[in-house]
Image (spheres, coloured by chain):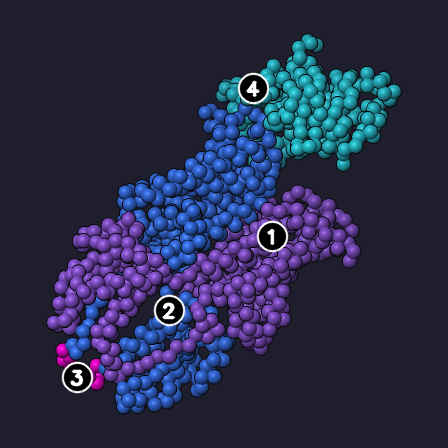
Amino acid sequence: MRTLFFLLRKEFLQILRNKLMIRMIIALPVVQLIILPNAANYEMKNINMSIVDHDHSEYSRQLINKFTSSGYFQLTDVSETYKDALVVVEEDKADLIVEIPQGFERDLIRDNKSKIMIVANAINGQASGLSVSYANSIIQDFNSEVRVEWIKPPRVNPQPIIEITTRNWFNPKMNYKYFMVPGVLVLLVTLVGFLLTAINIVKEKEDGTIEQLNVSPIKKYQFILGKLIPFWIIGNIVLSIGFGISYIVYGIVPVGNPLLIYLFAAIYLIALLGFGLLVSTFAETQQQAMFISYFFMTVFILLSGLFAPIENMPGWARILAYMNPVSYFIDVMRMIVLKGSGFTDILPNLGIISLFAIGFNTLAIFNYKKTV
Amino acid sequence: MQNEIVIKTDKLTKKFGDFIAANEITFEVFKGEIFGFLGANGAGKTTAMKMLIGISKPSSGNANIAGFDVYKNTEDIKRSIGYMSQKFSLYEDLTVKENLMLFGGIYGLSDEVIETKTNELLEKLGLQNDANKLVGSLPLGWKQKLAFSTAIFHAPKIVFLDEPTGGVDPITRRQFWDMIYEAAHNGITVFVTTHYMDEAEYCDRVSIMVDGVINALDSPAGLKKQFNANSMDDVFLMLARQAKRGD
Amino acid sequence: MKQLLTFIKKEFYHILRDRRSMLVLLGLPIVQLLIFGFAITTETRNCNIAILDNSKDEATQNIISRIESSTYFDIERTLSSNDQIENAFKTGRIKLAIVFQSNFQNDLLHTNKTQMQIITDASDPNQANTLANYVSAIVKDYQQELNQNKELPYTINTEIRMLYNPQLKGEYSSVPGVMGMILLLISAMMTSISIVKEKEIGTMEVLLVSPMKPSIVIISKVIPYFIVSLINVITILLISNFVFGIPIQGSFILLSLITVIYIICSLALGILISTVTSSQQAAMIISLMGLMLPVVMLSGYAFPIANMPLILQIISNVIPAKWYIIMVKDVMIKGIGLFEIWQELLIIIGMTSFFLVLSIKRFKVRLQ
């Protein structure tokens, strides 16, 4: 036990002297938390649009007005013909074209129907889908207004109507940042627990100091604990800094019990550190350690539900997502921070992450004994 | 010099698949001896040494280090020996004092003993003013001496040195060997591998490995007589020329 | 020239012998493409929802069975009281709950109006919106049927056309993004680490002292990664063509040209980084924090730049990947030519020159 104490002191001395790492430990949460939730915004606004108005009528003007005052769209171009508008899209000056045909107003009033064409730059499928849906709802709104103008109230419902009210729980303002911030917190803890650990252990391999320790009476478990404990502590520190920033910058306070988060994080970190240790047994140089870690991290993060819901993934991807420890933490983090879930609610996730922790560490220790 | 045997190997062998890196190595080392373990690159020196210091399991054969069996008691072996690797292996980002404290603690010395011995050592090496300097900032010669002192800090029975004098100027090398003499005089057996044939002359006995086998083992004087050579250099060349393995 | 070739060969040996890094370098783009292409979609399916049916009549059953048969939803549980709703959400099992009022069908038949409620888990606002919209659409369909498809008067019909990517495949925006990111990663990060590693080990000095001009040394370090980058680009294009079915609409030559220029830009950036750091760890951390993260976040690789707050949009202009991704989308997917993209091209060329000049200056300073 005394040996462990000496090892821990060494680790902390080394870490504290490593100015670069200290700066990174502090800067990373700050940068990521400030930039990422602001960048990862799937709400569309300021969509550049071009209008081709062949009608120049009262109605067409009203419709155009509705578009520009909606907040979603920015009128960047008015073209005479569709062809002109296409060029504008090609030049990236507009992503949406709304073409109003000649006789729009007349046809609507006289023939009871009229047509509008919406053309979207669909390279980004999701964004264009949303743009079109916004445009459509603006047109539908306008349509309803026209109808009301012409059909006299009061209306006893001539047709059956199912009235749907929508309530949005846990994030009533539909603020996308509330969705991203918990995810970014998980990302931070993952980076520290995984990437830093692997690189640190391999550095000792590269420097040759690991051999010196191997020849000494240090038991393997003491060495491993000596490596894992400091980063476990750092992981928790980073998490706390993250919470602080979330509060200061976004005003996000967990609805549920933060201690639950720390409980989960504690076990999660053990799992990740074990994985980092496992990676370090496969790498001979720091460069390799970084690459292998980066590779797994990318896969883990992409398949974790941080950017896109796991439910949407096809079967094989979902299986991978369920084998991914990060998914469980993101789930728990969102549950506790946004919904106020309790201990029993997160129990299944807690159980699974414990299995991960035991599994990874067992594998890691086994492999470590063999190769190092 | 007493005749207590501190290292005894009996047909110690290490195989990697079909490749026999060390083939039935058999020899003895006496307490307080300075034993030179020579051989060309690829001859199997490092492999053999790794078995002796307990980090590589032999494929067959037996060995007894400081009275402990190399299969059953590796932990005891590790407690009784010291080691200095080729890379000197001190922590460059820890200070002189911190390195000594670390290794002292790892080998189970109490805080008071560590304190006392550290002060003694710093005085002896003349490093009192550098006690709180990072090891990385020391010149190579000082690092080397410090590494050796750290290796024997806990007064082990045997100290293993792997090419300890690489890249150092001749004066520092001489001073280093003075330290080795002193350690041997104090009863610590020194097991050293080296490329420098003039250093072979400083040893009490020398063994030369060729292609995984010990081809010669005797005092430097005895070897020179046996091979009718004027220097250890010549002895080595004669033996090494027969080698099939190597760079 | 011969000296250059010798050095290039040496660098290649370094790279090829490091099998693990090689595996990652060549495998990462493939894995990313596949994940982005197939796994990360916003197409909803199999979402767990819960239903609280206070009415349990023919109408509600009808609606429920329509929802059940849709691939979007999986009815995970049926609730029996309002109190259960919150718990259902908190356990994380459901994303949406539907509540039918009591006497649903009765009211509908007698007063032509009835009510239902959709409650969403708005933790993911986009998903919530999408799901709510789907449910509404299903209900509106039912409603329309009840109306015997009577057409409403004064109807504006919209005709929708999607350009370049009619099936709204995610790969169309992810392939250019992955290209921009991977090339930057390999060229900039790998180059800087490789150069710094030699500095660290000390062999750099040996090279500099040799009769080789320093520029030759650097070029020899850079060319292997250039080639690896090219291999990656070809791999990506092959996958995008044959696996995703995205053809190259525009000129292949133009695409190659802008890719080569971008790779050179990234290599120059890598060289610049190597002149600023002295340890591998530092190079890695700077590459990670100063390069990878901003690129991933702000280049358009993962999130559309147009949605970002203004200041982030401004910062994104500094990132070479952003301009490259725009050019790739223009040439590869829109099929337009040099005439339209010359501005972006000029920007990248400008950045390349800037990086190179700065690197050369720093290099010279240190040699003195």
Q: From the image, tell me which residue sits under label 4.
A: B73
Amino acid at pointer 3: Lys
Read off the chain for label 4.
Answer: B
**Which numbered disc covers residue C190?**
1
Name the residue at 39% across, 63% down.
Answer: C43
Q: Is label 2 or label 1 in front?
A: 2
Q: Is label 4 or label 1 in front?
A: 4
Q: From the image, tell me which residue sits under label 2.
A: A130
Say whether residue A153 is magenta: yes
Name the residue at 48% across, 51% down.
Answer: A299
How far apart marks 3 and 1 lie (CA) works out to 71 Å
Judged from the image, the secondary structure of the residue bearing numbered disc 3 is loop
Percent from the top left, x then y, of residue A287? 58, 46
Magenta residues, as a range? A148-156
Asked if both marks, 2 and 3, belong to the same chain, the answer given is yes
How far apart marks 4 and 1 lie (CA) works out to 45 Å
Q: Which circle's residue, 2 or 3, is located before the other in the chain?
A: 2
Asked if both marks, 2 and 4, belong to the same chain, the answer given is no
Q: Who's purple, chain-wise?
A: C
Within 10 Å of disc 4 (Cα), the crowding (few <14, some 14-19, many 20+) is some
Asked if both marks, 3 and 1, belong to the same chain, the answer given is no
